[in-house]
Every structure is written in C-alpha cells, then in structure tokens.
Amino acid sequence: MKLVHILGIVFIGIALAFVVSLYGNPTKYVSFPEAAGYAAEHPDKEYHVVARLDKQRELFYNPRQNPNYCSFYAIDSLNNPAKVVYHNAKPQDIERTEKVVLIGKWSGDHFEASSILSKCPSKYNEELSKEQLSR
Amino acid sequence: MQEPSITFNGEHLFIGNLGHALVVLAFCSALFGGVFYWLAVSKNDNSLRKAGRWMFLVHALSVLGVFVTLFVIIQNHYYEYQYAWQHSSNSLPLKYMISCFWEGQEGSFLLWMFWHALIGVILVFRSKTWESPVLAIICLVQVALATMLLGIGDAPFKIGSSPFELTRMMSPDLLQIPVLQTLGKANYLQVLKDGNGLNPLLQNYWMVIHPPTLFLGFATAIVPFAYAMAGIWTGRMRQWLTPALIWGLICSAVLGTGIIMGGFWAYESLSFGGYWAWDPVENASLMPWLLIIASVHLILVARATGRHLITAMLLVSISFFLVLYATFLTRSGILGDASVHSFTDLGMSGQLLLFLFLFIFLSILLSAPAGEPRQWLGVAFVALLMVNLVPAVVELGGHIAPSWLSVGIRILDILAFVGGMLLFVRNLSRQTGSVKEEEQMFSRELWILAGSLAVVLSLVQVFLSTSNPVWNKLFGLNLGTLKEADYNQVQLWLAMPVLLFIGATQFLAYRKTDGRQLGRDMLLSASIALAITVAVNFSFQIISFKYLLFLFLGVYAVVSNVLYLSAQRHKLKLGGASIAHAGFGVLMVGVLVSSVNKKVLSAVPVDPNSKTPALAENITLYKQRTALMQPYEVQFKGVKQDGLNKYFQIQFTRRNAKDSSIADSFSLYPLAQNNPKMGLLAEPDTRHYLWADLFTHVSYESSLEQEEPFSDFKTDTFTLYRSRLSSDGTRKLTLDSIITTREEATGAIRIQPKFSVETLDGVFYAAPFHDYQLNLGLIGSRDTILDAAGLLMRFDKFNPDNNNLPASQVIVTTGIREPRRDFVVLKAILFPWINLVWAGTIIMVLGFAMAVWRRRAEQAIR
C-alpha cells in the first residue's frame, strides 16, 4: 500500500468520526417539556428552545441585588410556557425581540439558559415598520 | 400600488433610471463578453477575443457607473430611494456614508462585482494567452452576480433585488400615513426628511474597511478557479498552476486580512468579549480561506513534482464553490435562528443556490472529454436532479417536516452530487496521467499533502457544523448550532498536526531527503522550542497537558521556520513561506494564551451550594464607591454624556504590594447608548498593554431601570430654621429660608421655601416653588425630586393662602422611596498576550506578500 493511500484512509476515517460525533448525539431544538424530559437522562447536555418572551409576565432583573440573575417567562413554539433563568446580565434587547433561541437545560422548575440568541428586530431588517413611518 | 395619475414632487428619478440602465448594461455586456470569449476559445479566433475584450471593458465601466450612481444617491440623501432611506441618515459623516453602501445586500453584491470587474481588467491586459478562457469564466460569474441586482419580476419568480427601488414603491403604506391627507400624497418627500441611519454598531472605522477587504478576498478566489478551468478547457493541465499560485497567495493574504479585521472590529466594538465566536457568518468566510490555503500548498507540490495535480484542481474549485456557498449561507436567511448577524432573506436564496450548482456543473462539463456525448447527457441528468434541491431550501417559512419521499429524493440529490464530483476527478485523471513512482516517506510533497489534509479536515468540521441549518431544511432534521467550546475542542486537535508539519516540512526537499540530516534539524528546533516553551510558560502559566502540547507545537513552528530562514540569510526574499508559517505559529500561540488564560476580573464567586453554572461575570459598581477586582481597585467616577452616547468613567488603580503606593492608574470609558430603537448598545473600551489587554464593557446601567414610585406621603407644617424627620426617620429636613422674588416685566411672584436634607449619604438641597400672578392667582408650581435622597417635596400652602399660618411657616408634602444611587453593571476581562494574535496575523500576511512578490518575479523570468 502506498503512503498516500494510508494518508487518504486516515483522512476519511477522521472525517467520518466527525460525522458520527456531530450527528450521533447532536444538540437538538426541543420544546420546554421535552427539555424537562431529557434532563433526567442527560443532565449535562444542552438543548435549543425557540421561544418568544411572555410580555404579560414579569421580567426580573435587579442588579442592585445580583447583576448576574435575570429571569423571565417564555413561550416555546408549541405554546408551552416556562420560566427561564439566565445567570448573566439582562440581554440588551430582550424586551423587544420577537423570538429568542435559548440554549441550556432544564433544571427543577425552570429552564436554565447558558446563552440566549436574540435577534434585534431593527438589525439588518429590510422590512419597513409602521413605527418608523409614523415618525 | 399608487394611482398612476399622481406626479410626485421633488423626486430625482433620472439618477435611479440611469442606475437601472447601467445594471442592465452590465448584465448584457458581461453576457456578450462571455459569449465572445467562449467562441474565441472554441474557434481560436483573435477578432472574437477582441470583441470579448471590448465587451468586458464596457462591463467594467458600467459596474463602475452603477457604483458611482448608488453612491451619489446615498451621499445626496435622496430618500425617495429605499436604499438611501433604509441605510443612511442626514447626520452621518462621509466615512460612514461609505459603510451605508455595503450595509445592505445589494451594495455588497455590487462591491463584489466591482472587485471582479477590476481584477478582470487586470487579467485582460496581463494574462496573455489565458485571456479568452479565463475572462469567459469571469464574465459568466459577472452575469450571475448582475442578475442579483436586476430586480425584475414578482415573487416567487423575482430575479434579483435592485438598489434603485423607490421607497414609495417598496412601502406602499408610506403614502397612506395620515399626515399626507393634508399635505397631499405628491408631497410625501416632505415627510421623508431623514433616513433610518446606519446601525450604530456598524459606525466604526473597521466597518469602513473590513467589508471591502473581505470582498476583495472573495473576489480574488475566482482567479485560481478560472485558471484551473481554463487549464482543463484548453488542455494546459500544468501551465495554469503558476498564475493560480500567485492569485491563490493574494487571496490568502487579502481574505485572511479581511477575516481578522472583522475579528478586530468585533473585539473593539462588540460586547461579546472576544474576536472570534464561531458564529456561522464568521465560519462562512473562514471556510474558503482554509481551502485556498490548502490548495496553494498542493499547487506548489503539483508544480514541483507533478503529483496531486487533481487534488489541487479539486481544492481550487471547491474553494471557489465555498465562496458561493458562504454567500448563500449568509444571504438566504437560512441561518435565521443560528446566527446573530445574518442578513434577512431578500427572496434570492433559490437564485444563489442555482448559481452554486451552475458553477459546479460547469466545471464537470469542462472536464468532460470532447468525444463523449453520453457523459454530457449524464451530467445534465445529475444537474436536473440537483435543481430539485432549490425549492426545498427556498420554502423558508416554518418548520414543515418534509415527507419521506422528498427526503429520499434529496438524499439521491446528494449522492448525485458526489457522483458528479467523482466524474470530475475521473475526467481529470484521464487527462493528466499520474506519476507512477512511489512516494518517499521523507519527501516534502508527502508532508505538505499531510499538512494540507489536516487543514481540509478542519474545514470539514467547520463545514458540517455550520451547515446544520441546511441539513435541517433538507432532511427535516432538528440539529442545533454548536457552541464555541465544541468548535475549539475539535479545532485544537486539528491545529496541532498542522503546526507540526509547518515546523518540519521546510527542512524536507522534494522527492527525497536525507533522513539523518532531517532528524538533526528537527531535533535542534524541537529542543530550542522546548526550552522556549518552558521559559514562556513561567509567564503563561498553562497547566493542562493538551494546551501545553499545543503551545509547544506553536513555538516549534515559529522556531523551526526562523531557523530555516536564518540558515539561508542570503536568500531572504525567498523566505515568504517561512515568514508566513512563523506568523501562523505566533497567531496560534496568541489564540491559545489569550483564550485559555482569559480572566474575567469582574467575576464574583458563585455560591458553591447553588447548582447554577459559574456564569457570574458581571459586577455592579455604584457611583463613587470603590470595588475590588484583583489586582485593581475600581471606581465608577461618573458619566460623560455626548448626545445619546454615555461614556462611563471607570477608574482602575493598581497598588504595589509592599508599600501600597500607586503602581498604575488609568480610566476607561466604555460607552452605553440607550438607543430608542435598539435598547442598550454598548461599546467596550480597552486598555492596551504589550502583554495584555484590559477589556471593559457596560452590561446595564441605572437609567435603564424603571422609576420606582414614591410612597409614604405625609403633609407637614415646617417652621423656619426647624428640622423634621421623614416618615421612616432616615432623612432630616430643615427649612432654611423662604424666598419671594418678583419678576418686573410680568409681575409674576415666585414663592420658594428652601430646604436642606441630611441623609447618611450627605446633604442635599430642595426648593419647590409656586408662581403667582396678581389677578390670576396660582399660575405654576414645581415639585423637587432628590434621587440621591429618595425624596419628593411638594409645596402646598403658605401664609397668604392660609391666614392661620404665620409667615415663618409653610405646609409641604413629602414622599419617599429608596435613594437611587447611579450604578453601572460592568464586565471586565483580561486577555493576556492578545497582541500575539494581531502580530502573528500581520507577520503571516507579510509572508504571503513576499511570496506573491517572489512568484511574480519567477513568472517574469519564464
């Protein structure tokens, strides 16, 4: 066997290992109840939940007490509500976002987010909002 | 749509029509140029080549014309055009008017086309015998890009998106707003006086130069591809390598610079605290760069030994496809949930994907031998299958799970794609013929191949993970995005062999090397590297084995390239490769140290009993109070306001351990803007030292808080010079004086009792008042609110109002709440040795530039 072939086999082997490790046990998009269900099986694994902020309920952030505790209520895309706790400063534009992607895991009675992707509506937004027009 | 009868006042329609016309001209001239050049190749006809050349020059001029036209529209604030209205505003300075240009998708496509046109013009005059086939390919790409700006037809069959659309056409609601009922719809421009302005995050010096550099990098990737295709097409299977090498090196340098500029921008002006976050949009620009680096190395091997020619050709082609794929990822909206900064969909994702397929199949067709019509049929069939993927990706709305049948067909599509690539390789191998001799263990070509494959593996990992949203869309999967740590874990192990090969390969000769000499060279640089690693680790303090190994390999890569370079001092100008490699080593060491040893100074210890993650990275600083962030004493001194921008003065003081004298003291001014449209926008401020950066940014500040209402209202009679306590007993209020002033002109009289308020935090002064006019009675009054004392004072009654009251008494209502002390929530991070990241990049780019210089000189001699 030529050296080049050995290299090729090693290459393909590692590439396949990536495929297996990436897709064998991937991070998934789930609903809140699913996240709660998985928490028992895989306590360390994080999941993605696509949700929107429940603007009717309290968003708690009091940096005088603790600058690293922010909690709010969110409703996932299947309309399941849940409390979300984020041990960090309040994400800058969370009140105005239409949609957030919460990454984290279920913990007891709430979803513990380790990071929050929120799309600011005006960023790169090509749509024209009524609010802008009425200025 | 508006009624056709209205003539709108004040619009500058000519310039938009001119722009439209120039886009159409650019499209047509590229198309004809391509056809002429194409025929010039197949008929080998010089007059056709000249016709193609004229067409291309017309094309380049019209692209320049479109560029200028759009700029004039933005610069003159013609808000009747959607693009100007959406992306600029009256108050923007000139340099940011330039950024507005490429904030939108259309402008960035235009920028890309502009660079292609410029490169094309250079190639028209410099590429000699390659002109016709190379320019034919470039023309075709330009045709594809020009359709992106055409903006004709209606969804879902809309082709492109024009930057010259009128605001009133794009947003018909505009003409329906109530004000225009009185003004008249024809005068709508009087309402549209100012634009939406540029996203404040993009109002940064780096954002002026980062996009053009990045797009120049993307644009240069077309040249190696065009040469490779031209080589296959005209049967010059090896001659294409030299020009492709030069342009590949240019692309590596420029694209690399563009990427790191983006990183530097993120580091300097975004608040995520770092220069690289493995965001899909960042990955999209990294992927072509990784592959162009790998292909440059394989081109070198192929040039020197004739081996791995096909691999080189394959990698060059795929790196161009990856540029198109990157465009698709970032522009189609498919990254929606996965990235914080992808563009929204302009309805062009199908178009983008079609172009990607078009060029993939074009390259397969070009490789097909002339005498095999059956193969053409096969390729056409495969292409048709692939086009089936387009509608799958275009339906972007909602998460509709595809049926098993369509998933099956899509898997077939992917297999067809793999089949197409295999066909490409087979066609190439028939035309090139391979080197039969077995490869030697100690040969430069084998080691370069191994190192390049490690780079390709790094690409494979980034590609697979970044494409998760695409797999989700195609196969109805449910894959999330990877986090930074997931990428770092894998990429760390892939960078190690790359660093090893970078260090060792220079000492190898092509074909066969004396193993013993090689051993001596490697041993020497390895032992020096080990000594340096141990020495620098006194400062770096890295403990974990894998990071130490990485550090050693990084240092080894630098040392051995420096040794190699110094061994051939008389040929320094040949040292581009060594310098670029050493720069990459420095970069990797910088990345390692600045991220592994990154220290969040503002982190507060987390309660060990809580199960919450150790994320507590923010600290609350009260105004004028000192907090400790080892090794600094930190004080929030105050706020400097400049329009919407608030600069928070944070003073850092470090003391000598022995006598606690001040060793270092400075202030940082991180910015926070409470933007009416976007909420808190923070821009960090960083103290740069040679050995570290101290990075600070504002996460929150007191004025964002909801105002707490006053309570415990109490109405009291105050007597001059006497004191009273507030209802909760924490504030002592003394009536110091009662002032009566009379304004001569109006005859108004102001009566104002003045109080001093003592609290634990100090003494404050309050002076609510009443204004009277002789015949009208009370005409105005004002309460006093003392935020710092948490006190509201309302002046109720005094003597003339109430005859029972002596002149030395007033009746005042007080309300109380928690005293508000201004505070700021801050994150402070120490990045040790981050300057190595920037220095390494600069050295690397310098190396690339030297290599370009050298290869150009070589080409001139031939």
Image: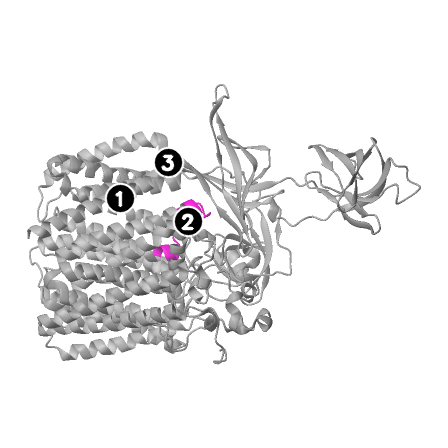
Q: Which residues are magenta?
A: B268-283
Q: Looking at the image, tell me whether mark 3 or mark 1 is earlier in sequence order.
A: 3
- Residue at x-position 27% and y-position 54%: B289
**Res. B545 in view:** no
Label annotation for residue B584: 1
- Which label's residue is closer to the chain start, 1 or 2? 2
Mark sitting on residue B515: none
Q: Amino acid at mark 1?
A: Phe
Q: CA distance from mark 2 to mark 3?
A: 38 Å
What's the distance in space between the residues labelled 3 and 1, CA to CA? 23 Å
In the picture, the disc for residue B204 is 2
Residue located 9% across and 44% down the image: B513
Disc 2 is placed on an element classified as loop
**Tag in front: 2 or 3:** 2
Residue B388 visible in the snapshot: yes
Give the class, few, some or many, for how many residues have Cα within 10 Å of label 1's Cα (few <14, many ≥20).
Answer: many
Q: Quadrant of residue B393?
A: bottom left
Prevailing SS of the magenta stretch: loop
